[in-house]
Image (spheres, grey):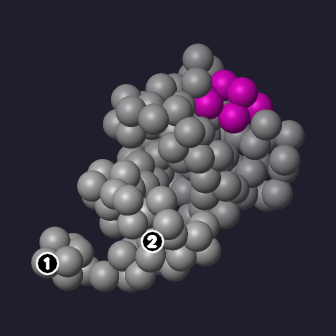
Amino acid sequence: MQNAKQLDRWIAQIAGGDTAALASLYQETSSSVYAYALSVLKNSHDAEDVLHDCYLSIWTAAASYRSAGKPMAWILTIAKNLCLKQLRSNSRTEALPEQWQNSPESAEMTAEDKVVLRQCMEALSDTERQIL
């Protein structure tokens, strides 16, 4: 891992639009960001999404970065916030209860009916979904 000064330099260069600096930062820090996201999310696909969103956020937020000597803390804070957002998103999109998925009625539903039902269920609040 590069030292904090090098990471700070890359972030400053990213703020100036330097894509090569972003590539260097990604190459140097992405394994740590991915490992952190995977440890929180326990899902490789979600962790990959967070990884890529993290570097997009770094690209857009680099100009507001103020060095405190801990650039990895800043990067991992971005990753943490994205993980929390992903966890909240996952909790809102619960799967249909198993008894609905395997009931005789569900076998008679068309694919379009299932999509409409899923969208309707997702539009309900948690309380409304529990009542239903």
Q: Residues within 10 Å of mark 2 (few under 14, many from 20)?
A: some
Whole-number angstrom distance, CA of label 1 to CA of label 2:
16 Å
Residue 59 position within the rendered picture, expressed as x and y whole percent measured from the top left: 69, 56
Q: Residues within 10 Å of mark 1 (few under 14, many from 20)?
A: few
- Check disc 2 and report its element: helix, strand or loop: helix
The answer to whether 120 appears left or right of 23 in the picture is: left
Closest to the observer: 42 or 70?
42
Give, as a three-letter code, the residue at label 2: Arg
Range of magenta residues: 24-30
In the depicted structure, whether residue 76 falls above or below residue 61: above
Q: Is residue 50 visible?
A: yes
Closest to the observer: 35 or 70?
35
Q: Residue at x 45, y 35 (%)?
A: 43
Q: Residue at x 84, y 47 (%)?
A: 19
Closest to the observer: 31 or 70?
31
Residue 94 position within the rendered picture, expressed as x and y whole percent measured from the top left: 34, 60
The residue carrying mark 2 is 118
